[in-house]
């Protein structure tokens, strides 16, 4: 199928402004509206097409995704934005967040408190993504977090003014951050434009922070990720987010931890699972195998004679640490008996010899299966 050209569908060029797109859509939608074209299949199809095109082009972010990745990109954007990431991120549903994983570490923002009397004075929370290995999750690890964010201005001590008493109540709103005016019968309340809702104006703004009491700086923190942390967990570091305006409360830093897949172990809560192949002769005669454990040691594991494929062994306490306790989960080993994929002439001779010396009860499953099968076949014969 040819790639859909949404611009062509709406009859606009690729540089069209959102107003032009809107106008073009309205004109076409009126022309092809089903109410005006009853029973006209061609118009019905056209109407669907222009709706689909407008759905994408009216939204700046979807339009950008479409420009870069085509119609499918815009659809994927719909899906990702539609929920895939929401549950986990809880409140970070913007574009950067949805595509954040693609770009690796990134810093996202979410708005500060808006319920305060004076708006916009609190700093935003910051999200930081980090990825650690399973071994690091086992031992715990120091995470060096480096990002740029508005920090407190040391020059003016967050006051935003050169002199101590350089702040005065905003003359427009008299310090409330809001202005009211009468419109007909109604009293309208709006955020004060003069002070952007802060309630104050600065007589002599600090040069370094331009009166904000904060400016963008590089932050370098070392944060301990505790042993036993689970994939997708977040760590809150209080007050290490964006600084507030002129001494407003700082936001928090949230470190989102994801754990890389391990070559050998799969994790389920505090327990680890791994599959271990053993040789046929070890399975038959028994023996011992060595298994590396997540703590960096090697565990000697006894294989009892006659061990079958699918046998599960449990190494107690060799799993992940359980947070806020001194306990550990277990390591479960799933045994797979590997048969030789080739044999020498001598080995064949020995195996044939081995098979000749039949010992009743040595293969209970096989013997039981064929005994049952015999009964089943003779039963069918009887009934026919
Ligand atoms: Zn300053
Ligand atoms: Zn004001």
Image (cartoon, grey):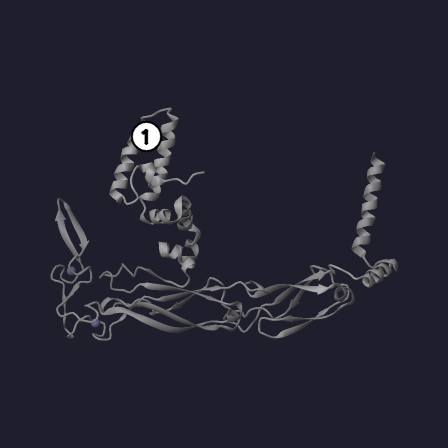
State left or right for residue 380 relative to residue 260: right
Q: Please give the residue where the numbered disc 1 appears in the rendered image.
A: 33
Q: Eyeballing the image, is 34 above or below 288?
A: above
Q: Taking the image as four quarters, which one is ligand 1 found in?
A: bottom left
State which quarter of the image contains the N terminus.
top left
Q: Work out whether residue 199 can be spotted.
A: yes
State left or right for residue 132 relative to residue 60: right
> Which quadrant of the view contains residue 314?
bottom right
> Which of the pair 236/71 is nearer the observer?
71
- At 42% from the left edge and 62% from the top edge, which residue is drawn? 104
Q: Residue furthest top?
A: 39
Residue 226 at x, y percent in the picture: 47, 71
- At 83% from the left edge and 35% from the top edge, which residue is drawn? 383
- Marks counted in the figure total 1
Q: Eyeballing the image, is 287 above or below 373?
A: below
Q: Secondary structure at mark 1?
A: loop
Residue 159 at x, y percent in the picture: 20, 71
> Which quadrant of the view contains residue 7?
top left
> Which quadrant of the view contains residue 26?
top left
State left or right for residue 117 relative to residue 358: left
Q: Is mark 1 within 8 Å of ligand 2?
A: no
State left or right for residue 245 relative to residue 46: left
Q: Work out whether residue 94 can be spotted.
A: no
State which quarter of the image contains the C terminus.
top right
Q: Residues within 10 Å of mark 1 (few under 14, many from 20)?
A: some
Q: Eyeballing the image, is 72 above or below 345?
A: above
Residue 207 at x, y percent in the picture: 18, 71
Q: Eyeballing the image, is 361 above or below 151?
A: above
> Which of the pair 114/290 is nearer the observer?
290
């Amino acid at each position: 199928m040819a790639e859909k050209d949404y611009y062509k569908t709406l009859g606009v060029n690729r540089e069209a402004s959102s107003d032009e797109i809107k106008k073009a859509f309205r004109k076409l939608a009126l022309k092809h509206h089903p109410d005006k074209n009853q029973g006209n299949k061609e118009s019905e199809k056209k109407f669907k097409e222009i709706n689909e095109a407008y759905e994408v082009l009216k939204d700046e972010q979807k339009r950008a995704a479409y420009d870069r990745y085509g119609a499918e990109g815009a659809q994927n954007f719909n899906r990702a934005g539609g929920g895939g990431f929401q549950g986990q991120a809880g409140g970070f549903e913007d574009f950067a967040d949805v595509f954040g994983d693609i770009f690796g570490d990134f810093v996202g923002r979410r708005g500060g408190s808006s319920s305060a009397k004076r708006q916009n004075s609190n700093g935003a929370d910051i999200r930081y993504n980090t990825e650690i290995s399973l071994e690091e999750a086992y031992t715990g690890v120091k995470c060096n977090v480096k990002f740029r964010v508005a920090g407190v201005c040391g020059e003016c001590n967050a006051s935003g003014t050169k002199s101590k008493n350089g702040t005065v109540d905003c003359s427009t709103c008299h310090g409330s951050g809001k202005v009211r005016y009468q419109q007909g019968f109604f009293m309208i309340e709006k955020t004060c434009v003069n002070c952007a809702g802060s309630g104050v104006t600065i007589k002599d703004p600090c040069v370094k922070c331009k009166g904000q009491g904060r400016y963008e700086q590089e932050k370098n923190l070392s944060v301990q990720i505790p042993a036993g942390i689970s994939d997708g967990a977040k760590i809150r570091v209080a007050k290490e987010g964006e600084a507030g305006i002129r001494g407003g409360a700082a936001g928090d830093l949230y470190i989102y931890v994801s754990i890389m897949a391990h070559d050998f172990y799969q994790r389920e809560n505090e327990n680890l699972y791994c599959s271990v192949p053993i040789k046929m002769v070890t399975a038959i005669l028994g023996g011992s195998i060595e298994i590396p454990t997540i703590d960096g040691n090697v565990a000697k594991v006894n294989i009892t004679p006659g061990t079958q494929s699918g046998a599960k062994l449990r190494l107690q306490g060799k799993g992940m640490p359980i947070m806020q306790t001194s306990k550990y989960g277990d390591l479960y080993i799933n045994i797979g008996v590997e048969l030789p994929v080739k044999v020498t002439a001598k080995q064949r001779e020995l195996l044939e010899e081995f098979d000749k010396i039949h010992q009743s009860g040595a293969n209970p499953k096989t013997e039981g299966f064929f005994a049952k099968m015999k009964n089943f076949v003779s039963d069918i014969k009887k009934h026919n």
